[in-house]
Amino acid sequence: MTYRRILVPFDDSPLARAALSIGAWLAWRSNGELDLVRAVPHVHAPFTPRPVPGMAHLEAEQDANNLAESKTELSVEASRLREKGITATGVALAGEPLRVLIDYIKGLDIDLVVMGTHGRPLTQRWLLGSVANVTARTSPVPVLLVPQEGQFHRDDELRVLVAFDGSKVATAALDAALSLVRTVPTTVTLFEVLPGDSPSTDEKTVDWYEKPVLGAPPDLDEAHERLLKAGVASERAYSFGDAAAEIVEFAERGKFDLVVIGTHGRTGLDRLVTGSVAEQVVQRATIPILITSGAAAPASRGQMMGAGARDS
């Protein structure tokens, strides 16, 4: 599969503009289609102790005006993209953002979602809510989260870091990376963080990351060999310590364009208590993060890696 049908939730904010830049570039590189979508929630009038005559009519009128205005704005934005040679449509739909996005993804056979993220700390997001965060955990397709300043370093051949430990979640993440390989020339680096103490940053040269680790599980080496046999440019790297911290540090030191990581898609208090490596990487990273959730990882998608991956 390639990323040919790309959805960008768009509200003309700086975050949405950053996501649109990457989404449009990917659509152009894949000769695909770009869908700009905006959810227009229902207008709720201020609470009053007694019903106000005609209030429901005023709310409905405001909803209609907001929807019409959004449709016009997205139509204009899509027209600008088409002038640049990108196949694009703009759609505004009434409803709450998360439900609108998930329904659109399922109904229009979207391959990839690209959206901006503030990268707020987990506890703050859990209390305030985050459409990007929840979409990444529940979307049936991969979601590329883009910080406001998180553009790719290069546009000729991307360097992609895949967090890999042999689990089904990691295998789904690798499948998502392979779809990117089929969209744009890409070098994939499989990166595994093993238990143990991490040395100081000064000791971590490029050669240090690339040295094989005695006693390490064979999953990463096996995945690397399968990628090479499939004609995919692949490298290996290892580290020790806190997984999220090591992924972020290596991604920055190696000047990667993108990190790909899987998540179980846990929700609510369970996620808040147990934590998530993917959540922490999104919070700390300054480059785009491609996430696959449990909802986006049916067993049939592990085609490249085969059936030997262990469950996480």
Image: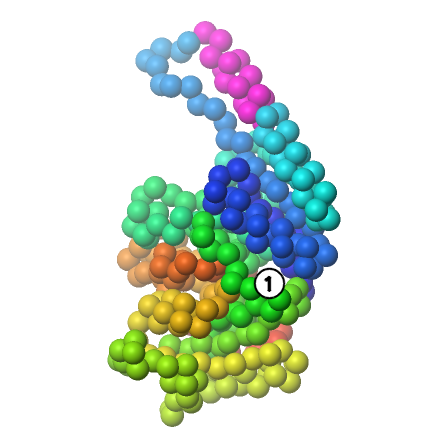
Q: 231 or 102, which lies in front?
A: 231
Count of labels in the image:
1
Quarter occupied by residue 223? bottom right
* Colour convention of the picture: rainbow
State whether the magenta stretch is mostly helix, strand or loop.
Answer: helix
Is residue 62 depicted above or below 88 in this figure? above
> Is residue 57 in the magenta section?
yes
Q: Residues within 10 Å of mark 1 (few under 14, many from 20)?
A: some
Quarter occupied by residue 237? bottom left
Is residue 100 depicted above or below 105 in this figure? above
Q: Name the residue furthest top.
A: 53
Is residue 99 depicted above or below 46 in this figure? below
Q: Residue at x 36, y 69 (%)?
A: 249
Q: Identify the image quadrant of the C terminus.
A: bottom left
Report which residue position mark 1 lands on.
155
> Is residue 148 in the magenta section?
no
Evaluate whether residue 294 shows in this view: no
Q: Which residues are magenta?
A: 53-67
